[in-house]
Image: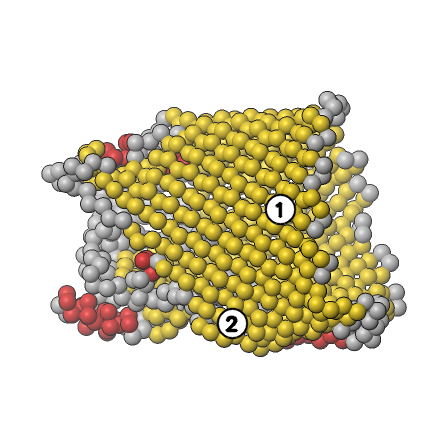
Amino acid sequence: MKMMPRAARTPFMLGLLVAAIALLAAPADAQELKLGDYTISGDLEGGVRQLYGERRDSRFNEFREIPQGLFFPGLRLDVGKPGYYYELRAEDLLENDQSLRFSLGSPGLYRLDVEWNELQHMFKNQAITPYSGVGGSDLTIDSAVRTVIQGQSSSAQITSVDSLFRSGHREVIGFDRDRAEVKFRTMLAPDFTVKTYYKNERWDGTRPINMLFGSSPGGRPFIELPMPVDYRHDVVRLALEWARNGNSLEVGYEGSFFENRYGSVTFSNPFRGTDASSTPARGRFALDPDNQAHYLNVHGAFNLPAETRLMGTFSYGWLTQDETFVPHTINTALTSSTLTLPRNSLDGELNPTLVNLVLTNRAIHNLTITGRYRYYDLENNTKHIEFPGHTVGDVSQVTTSTLENSRIEYTRQNAGVDLSYRLSNNLKLSGGYEWRKADYHELHAKENQEDRAKVSLDIKANNWLMIRPAYIYSDRSVSGYVAQSLPTQAERREFNLAERERHEGKLMARIMPSDRFSITFEGGLGTEDYNAKYGLDEGYVWNASVEVAVTPVDWLNMFASYTHERVFGKIHSVQNSRVGGVDTFFDVDAWTMKFTDDYDVIRAGFDLLLYENKEKGRKVTARAEMSYAYSSGETRNSKDDPASTVVATENWPDIKAKLWGVFTRVDYHLSKHFSIGAGYNYERYTLDDFTQRWVDVVVPSQISTRVYSLGDRLDNYEAHTVAMFARWRF
């Protein structure tokens, strides 16, 4: 399925533009446009642009569309009459990432909002695949071709399949996401308001997914497939609100309905034309199932005696999923009776309960006390299902060991209190404590508990200096951890269930001696220690940023900023020594991986008034901005004990990405209502990633497990955009 421009909607969009331009036909020196009781104002910007450079890489248009020719970046239309208003807003009209909003209403009586948003996600715009039926649920390769390949020797099969994938046809892999929203609220009585909301989202296209025949590792080929994307998601909300004198109560319902037009995907095995117990002719996998969610919600806020206010939320939900199961295998050569499904569907049901309370008191002068409590319980009412056997990857690994679905449940509670005391007009001290607890069912731990304490100080001096230091300490403990079956897993901890001690320090400072100069600094340092022999051991994050804004003269404004962040982590692992065919782990065979990620962003620019004639309303303005972003990832591996003869470590190559940007614009305002301009934008992106070197149609032969991909790796790009535009205001 190829992503295409939304040409079907173009006449409608052009109609909106023609109507808006007709409204703009008022005289250039008119102060406002009036039609009877209606007052009309707004603006429209449009122009033409040309793109140059190497920009075919899918990264350039990953989440946006920048077409050549006509473009309309913005439209604003406001129509009003006594007691009523109408609004129209639009951005990036006629493009795959456009958005529109229309509103009408009467202040204090009702309001209607209708919104439309489009977004694209481009994965590969020059993918290569031998499969037919792209965009659907049945991906096929001619069975006659596969039968011939099946009869060849192993080396000849590899040569034939390599050629088959390299000579495939071109496809665009990506999907469009469209969202429509309608909001309406109206006052039924002086204190009662009805709120309604409806959202419809659609995803159409394809996305890449890796599949294989058999288990991994096992020397079997991986195949990257264009998985179909055809989702529908509807959300409905209905609420009744009562509000009077600062008190309010709202009762509502929310429903969520997700539909996947495809329940599964079937794909041909390029190496075989007929089924065999060791290798199938086709594979099949399930896609995201249809599901529903229903919630009853109650929200309230009430003023209580002694300068106290209570706010709270209660919610109860029903989440259901009853999609028909996909059979264990599509391989007709596997006929074991243990592969018979015990049920046709899951008949799953989850029931979440949420209680959230916030109590604030200001009875004591200069002191604010805030207490919080949150309770969330996820109850799983899905029945246990026992599967007497299963197979992996449609091959002969049929087992008779009984498996059953996990019924994960948990309860999370948070309680805390915050104190804020104003010591003086320029000094405020804040602190707080929070208790967190989670109880789990059928997870790798029974419970975890965390204590958090925080303190901060707000300092202001003479309205030109503000400093805010803050510190947070937290300690998490875990009880009843259930390890996996391998010996090494007994001493390994999952990231979110490991004991942890964390320290966080933050500092914000702002200096503004005058309206013409300001400098802001923000920084932070956080450290983490995990009490686990294997797994994540320790890490830290630190960041710092500075931003400067200067207006030396009335006609020049300059700004610049710099941000740096570093993330570091250390992970301990142990190699499997396999003694006598049994998984065996010795401490001497442990090794450590250290990773460091750095991020730097530089930004600078100016706004310039080149010419101004206030009497005629004419002026020339210019704006320029430069940005540079750099990221790097470093991974270093080393033995914990040099005496180990089992562990062999190697450092991974560094991963580096750079993005340059230059954005310029000059506007000539011929009057208060009309301006013309020109602009030039430059973008350059480079990526040095060793994992991308192999993203070809066929992985080089030195890789033990062959990979057949969709190709079209994310190469570097360099793009130049030149534009001329005009803007009308009325």
Residue type at the position of mark 2: His
Residue 373: image location, x then y, percent: 58, 29
Q: Please, is residue 450 above or below residue 74 in the view?
A: above
- Mark 2 in CB contact with mark 1 (< 8 angstroms): no
Q: Position of residue 313 (x, y in %)?
A: 63, 35
Picture quarter with the C terminus: bottom right
Given residues 170 and 189, the one toward you in this image is 170
Which residue extends farthest left? Answer: 580
Circle 1 sits in a helix, a strand or a loop, which is it?
A: strand
Farthest right residue in view: 36
| Label 2 or label 1, whichever comes before in sequence order | 1
Residue 315: mark: none
For disc 1, the marked residue is 519
Q: Residue at x 24, y 69 (%)?
A: 162
Q: Quadrant of the N terminus?
A: bottom left
Q: Which residue is mark 2?
A: 720
The image shows residue 368, relative to residue 166, as above or below, that is above
**Direction from residue 43 to residue 125 in the image, left or right:** left
Circle 2 — which element?
A: strand
